[in-house]
Image (cartoon, rainbow, N blue to C red):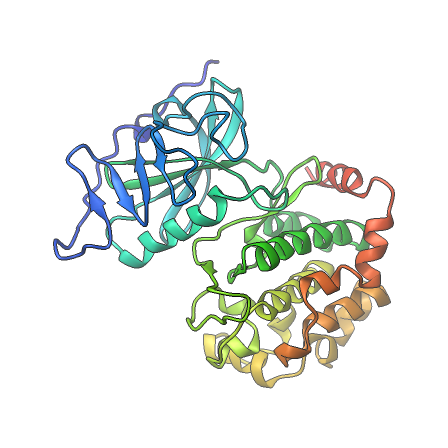
């Protein structure tokens, strides 16, 4: 049965609720959205801080950072298949792009009402638009139409690590090692090349494909550092995966992302969020108190039976311990973690990424 273009992609009717005194962006009579040297319209990105598309109506094969397809990936060409997910401020849909024959993930944000959200959108564009990294989800184009900003992103057909962990229950050393190798590669690129934190690293923001590709996503709250020694001073992100220094309000930098890596690895290995047994109550303050003042999960007597039952390898446990050091300066960098025996063993495994893809397909 032929796929029909849904009406909501081109005929959205949303009130913007704009404050007329808000001048953090401009909106022309023709419906063009401009902010921080980005210009978006229904035909795509027409200008960027990186000078990729000056004078063009959209990304083309010669202008696109990824060269995926010729011509415009105009919003009107995209045909919706189904909704993939939704959050407090966004909806993600699976769409089909007929000229290229590709499936894309279309992230839809009602960004006009909230200045902070508008800035998050631009931050995400800045991260994705100017990168060539196999470990970050790719941006094909971006559009603006009737109060909505759309990001046309690479579609990862195996879903998020959160989805995968839910299906698998526990993830063994071999697939987990392959996943962590690629997560670290993505962080190395962000930290070393872009001088930037992810700041919201969690299983839901790690995407996988049936080919065994693993990529970081959702950079809406990422913040570019002014230099390699700068530290972030804001408090945002997901509390479950926040490092102790973030929770107490100290300045934080790249080690905060490394903390997330350790917590995610342990969660995938045991099939449960590691701090759940340490939290006496069910509220936010119970959780953050456990993270800041409680024992580390690898040293928590309440978690010991779970660790024993999961049968974690010594290399994996040591990897997690290195990441989950409460003192931020004691944690290794993402680059240093590439030399850890757990990671080295995964990298030495023949056709590890192919095997990860087969393992992922076996979950379906």
- Measured along the vertical axis of the image, is residue 4 above or below residue 339? above
Front residue of 247/170: it is: 247
Front residue of 313/64: it is: 64
Residue at the bottom extreme? 293
Q: Residue at x 69, y 60 (%)?
A: 271
Q: Is residue 270 visible?
A: no
User: Quick check: 280 left or right of 126?
Assistant: right
Front residue of 272/59: it is: 59
Q: Position of residue 32 (x, y in %)?
A: 24, 36
Location of residue 7 by image quarter: top left
The quarter in which the C terminus is drawn is top right
Q: Position of residue 273 (x, y in %)?
A: 62, 65
Q: Residue at x 53, y 39 (%)?
A: 138
Q: Is residue 54 visible?
A: yes
Q: Residue at x 19, y 54 (%)?
A: 23
- Measured along the vertical axis of the image, is residue 66 above or below residue 159? above
Q: Residue at x 60, y 71 (%)?
A: 276
Location of residue 310 by image quarter: bottom right
User: Quick check: 306 left or right of 50?
Assistant: right
User: Quick check: 133 left or right of 336?
Assistant: left
User: Quick check: 25 left or right of 223?
Assistant: left
Residue at the left extreme? 20
The number of discs equals 0
- Measured along the vertical axis of the image, is residue 69 above or below residue 237? above
């Amino acid at each position: 049965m032929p796929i029909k273009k849904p009406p909501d992609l081109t005929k959205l009717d949303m009130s913007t609720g704009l404050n007329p005194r808000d001048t953090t962006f401009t909106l022309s009579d023709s419906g063009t959205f401009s902010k921080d040297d980005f210009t978006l319209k229904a035909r795509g990105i027409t200008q960027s801080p990186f000078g990729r598309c000056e004078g063009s109506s959209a990304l083309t094969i010669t202008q696109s950072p990824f060269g995926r397809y010729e011509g415009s990936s105009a919003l009107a060409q995209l045909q919706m298949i189904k909704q993939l997910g939704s959050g407090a401020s966004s909806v993600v849909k699976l769409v089909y792009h007929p000229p290229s024959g590709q499936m894309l993930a279309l992230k839809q944000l009602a960004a006009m009402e909230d200045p902070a959200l508008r800035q998050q959108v631009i931050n995400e564009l800045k991260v994705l638009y100017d990168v060539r990294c196999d470990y970050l989800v790719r941006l094909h184009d971006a559009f603006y139409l009737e109060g909505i900003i759309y990001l046309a992103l690479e579609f990862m057909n195996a879903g998020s690590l959160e989805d995968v962990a839910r299906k698998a229950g526990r993830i063994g050393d071999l697939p987990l090692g392959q996943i962590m190798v690629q997560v670290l590669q993505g962080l190395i690129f962000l930290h070393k090349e872009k001088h930037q934190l992810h700041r919201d690293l969690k299983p839901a923001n790690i995407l996988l494909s049936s080919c065994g590709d693993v990529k970081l996503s959702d950079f809406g709250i990422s913040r570019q550092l002014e230099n390699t020694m700068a530290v972030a001073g804001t408090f945002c992100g997901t509390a479950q995966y926040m490092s102790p220094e973030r929770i107490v309000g100290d300045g934080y930098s790249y080690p905060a992302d490394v903390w997330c890596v350790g917590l995610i690895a342990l969660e995938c290995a045991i099939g449960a969020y590691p701090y759940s047994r340490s939290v006496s109550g069910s509220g936010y303050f119970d959780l953050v108190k456990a993270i800041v003042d409680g024992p580390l999960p690898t040293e928590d007597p309440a978690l010991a039976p779970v660790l024993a039952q999961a049968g974690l390898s010594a290399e994996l446990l040591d990897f997690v311990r290195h990441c989950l050091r409460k003192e931020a300066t004691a944690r290794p960098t993402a680059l240093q973690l590439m030399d850890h025996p757990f990671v080295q063993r995964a990298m030495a495994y023949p056709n590890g990424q192919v095997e990860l893809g087969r393992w992922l397909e076996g979950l379906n």
